[in-house]
Image: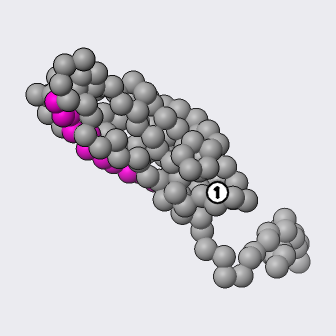
Amino acid sequence: MAIKATVCLNANCTVSNTVYLVAGAEPLQSGLAIVDPGEVCVPPGTFNVVAYFGGWNSGDPLPTGLLTFSNPTWMPSTFQLSVSPAVFNGKPGAIVSEYYFESYAQPEMEISVSYSGDATWPADSAGIVAVPAFCGEP
């Protein structure tokens, strides 16, 4: 449905740009999620953090904002990445492969991912806790 607004003040009228309204449409929800790496074997202790838009469906516009990966509990770090298409099960997102545990005795690692939002997709966030596990000598 196309909608235009006419606003008049003292017989001076202006007409707005056309706005298109889809009846019954709901705002898109990103469903930002992080793939749980499970227990991380130490050694070697390296692991990927994969964030993706679980609410994205084929035909939806790709998110254009930034994903920020943060880890305040160990080796404090922040990574900012643009969203890439088809990162996890065909869904857009981003991957950071810079995470690691130096020792299995190290505490759990809290990792959060936030999305800045854009004109179509609202801001969102998600988090996980990665746990180191002793898996034997290399």
Asked if 4 appears above or below 37 in the picture, the reply is below
Residue at 71% x, 82% y: name it. Answer: 23
Figure quadrant of residue 136 = top left
- Residue 84 magenta: no
Horizontal side of residue 7 vs 95, given as left or right: right
Instruction: Indicate whether 104 appears above or below 88.
Output: above
In the image, is 53 to the left or to the right of 130?
right
- What amino acid does circle 1 point to? Thr
The residue lying furthest to the top in this view is: 138
The residue to which callout 1 is attached is 120
User: Residue 10's image quarter?
Assistant: bottom right
Q: Which residues are magenta?
A: 123-134
Q: Residue at x 48, y 31 (%)?
A: 80
The residue positioned 27% from the left and 34% from the top of the image is 40
Q: Quadrant of residue 28?
A: bottom right
73 displayed left or right of 32: left
Mark 1 residue element: loop
Main secondary structure found in the magenta portion: strand
